[in-house]
Image (cartoon, grey):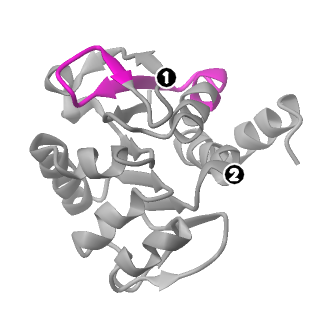
Amino acid sequence: MNKVCVFFGTGFEEIEALTVVDLLRRAAIDVSMVSITGEKRVESSHKIWVEMDMLIEEVDFSQVNMIVLPGGMPGTKNLEACQLLMEQIEKFHEEGKYLSAICAAPSIFGHRGMLKGKSACSYPDFESHLEGAQVTRNPVEIAGNIITSRGMGTAIEFGLAIVARMKDEETAKELSKKIIYG
């Protein structure tokens, strides 16, 4: 079974994070909400507190197939400041395991040179951080093992792309119909 972890730092963008979690759970994909703060409750960029499933220190990364990074400020900066998470992102990239990020968070991959020669997208203010990428304005870009997306308004499409990658296109299409998307 595929295992996905969505990582939450203080200041995460609610829609980007929770839409992915919701869609994956509807598709019966094993997904965990993971705090990088040392606390099980994490505060969003709009002062909403969300209860996590676990702390980053509890994650068995060998059992995880995809890391998902929501955007938001200062959530993205807090994710990038988490050394353990950055080490795992580097390891996932080296091993060709799946990495996904939305809004400002694709900048984390850009800062690490992971987007060179690949199509990628992000929130417009962060496109300059997609170092070496072929930047697009598409709602979602899939380039090998990396999925990027632009922001809150593209969260459903981003989540469905993850469902398609973790299960299949048919499951994503059926889920899209069930939630009256598109």
* Label 2: few (<14), some (14–19) or many (≥20) C-alpha neighbours in 10 Å: few
Please determine whether, in this image, residue 28 is positioned above or below residue 8: above
Membership of 123 in magenta stretch: no
Residue 58 appears at what percent x and percent y?
17, 19
At a point 22% along the width and 16% down the height, the residue shown is 39
The secondary structure type at the circle numbered 1 is loop
Please determine whether, in this image, residue 73 is positioned above or below residue 41: below
Question: What is the span of residues highlighted in magenta in the rendered image?
Answer: 23-42
The secondary structure type at the circle numbered 2 is helix
Tag 2 residue: 153
At label 2, the amino acid type is: Gly
Looking at marks 1 and 2 on the same chain, the residue that comes earlier in the sequence is marked by: 1
Horizontal side of 143 relative to 36 (left or right) equals right
**Observer-nearest residue: 83 or 90?**
83
Q: Quadrant of the N terminus?
A: top left
Horizontal side of 80 relative to 13 (left or right) equals left
Horizontal side of 111 relative to 28 (left or right) equals left
At a point 19% along the width and 62% down the height, the residue shown is 94
- Hey, which quadrant is residue 66 in on the image? top left
At a point 38% along the width and 25% down the height, the residue shown is 43
Tag 1 residue: 48
At a point 16% along the width and 49% down the height, the residue shown is 81
